[in-house]
Image (tube, grey):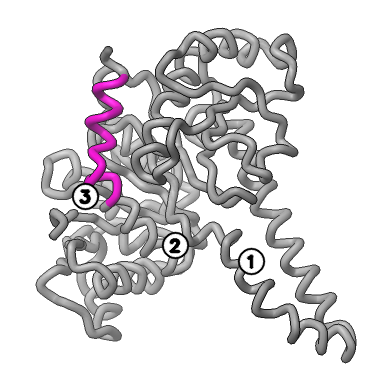
Amino acid sequence: MSETVRVVVDAMGGDYAPEIPVKGAVDALKENRDIHIYLTGIPEVVEQELKKYDYPRERMEVVAASQVIETAEPPVTAIRGKKDSSIVVGQTMVRKGEADAFVSSGSTGAVLVGGQVIVGRIKGVERAPLAPLFPTAKGASLLIDCGANVDARPSHLVQFAKMGSIYMENVVGVDKPKVAIVNIGAEEEKGNALVKETFPLLKECADINFVGSIEARDIPAGAADVVVCEAFVGNVILKLYEGVGMTLISQIKGSMMSSLRSKLGALLVKPALKGTLKRFDPSGYGGAPLLGLKGLVVKTHGSASADEIKHAIFQCQQFKEQRIADKIREHLLV
């Protein structure tokens, strides 16, 4: 039997709170007996939502948090001023060792700031990057960083590569994951100042499988398992990736319903198409962990579905079982 993982879920965070966070938490409990969940939020609101479900009550607790950090609030001010918010209360539980992980669909800025100042970075970690898994033709790759550090230095990207490699190898199970840096060409001499300075440093890293540069068009094909970049580039890649995916799906569905003939054809290809689209559904990969912290913080989309919340909770279990924080600490202090 696996060790129980204690996960705090921000019940007040996201576009569809508390309905979606609560449902995702309940679904996770029903599917996995080795999870204990704490829902942080306004008790009467959260408990009213929980009345909709039948679930193992001995593994679910509501932790009172009287305040909510809104998306538009300045992150630093919100974290400092709203000490009883669902985000601060949840991350404080992780810092104190009362929980193993924190999952939120709330304000990205507040979650990132809280992760850094409340949970805290592992000694030796210069910056903590957001690292989501995203679907590719070969399975899944890790994009690191996608939104936490827009002014990264070469030493930061080197640490991102090492942390990403550890995560892919131990959580996803990729042997010697291929690490590449995002560039505008395959040649080593190409790129901006940051890429040109980082490239030779990555080549010298004996503990990662660095394969060189990767152009954006090669990312969906799965040419690398760990895609390294600073947060501005990473966020643009991620948002474009999601936008193109949604547009293509919408266009395909529209074309299939455009005539009787296409509708008949759609019935024939539906089973195969459904399986393919499911593999490219990002919700099945959970959220983006903020790597390099003393405890685990996972950020999901603001519009996350219950399924994404559920898989983010499962991510937390894998993170604990594989001792990812300990392995990052060990690799970065050698």
Tell me which corner region of the image, top left, top right, bottom left or bottom right, holds residue 267: bottom right
- Magenta region: 318-331
Q: CA distance from mark 3 to mark 1?
A: 37 Å
Left or right: 261 with respect to 199?
Answer: right
Indicate which label's residue lies in the foreground, 2 or 3: 2
Residue depicted at x 59% and y 23%: 211
Q: Amino acid at mark 1?
A: Leu
Q: Which residue is mark 3?
A: 89
Q: Secondary structure at mark 3?
A: helix
The answer to whether mark 2 and mark 3 are in CB contact below 8 A is no
The picture quadrant where one finds residue 236 is: top right
The residue under label 2 is 308
The local secondary structure at tag 1 comes to helix
Q: Sequence order check: which comes first, mark 1 or mark 2?
A: 1
From what the image shows, is residue 166 above or below residue 104? above
Residue visible at 34% across and 62% down in the picture: 12
Say if 19 sits above or below 148 in the image: below
Residue 16 magenta-drawn?
Answer: no
Q: Residue at x 69, y 54 (%)?
A: 243
Q: Does residue 115 appear to the left or right of 145 in the view shown?
A: left
Q: Which numbered disc, 2 or 3, marks the residue that appears first in the sequence?
A: 3
Nearer mark to the viewer, of 1 and 2: 1
Question: In the rendered view, would you say 261 is above or below 154?
Answer: below
Q: Residue 331 is drawn in which quadrant?
A: top left
Badge 1 density bin: few <14, some 14–19, many ≥20, Cα 10 Å:
few
- Mark 3 surroundings: few (<14), some (14-19) or many (≥20) residues within 10 A: many
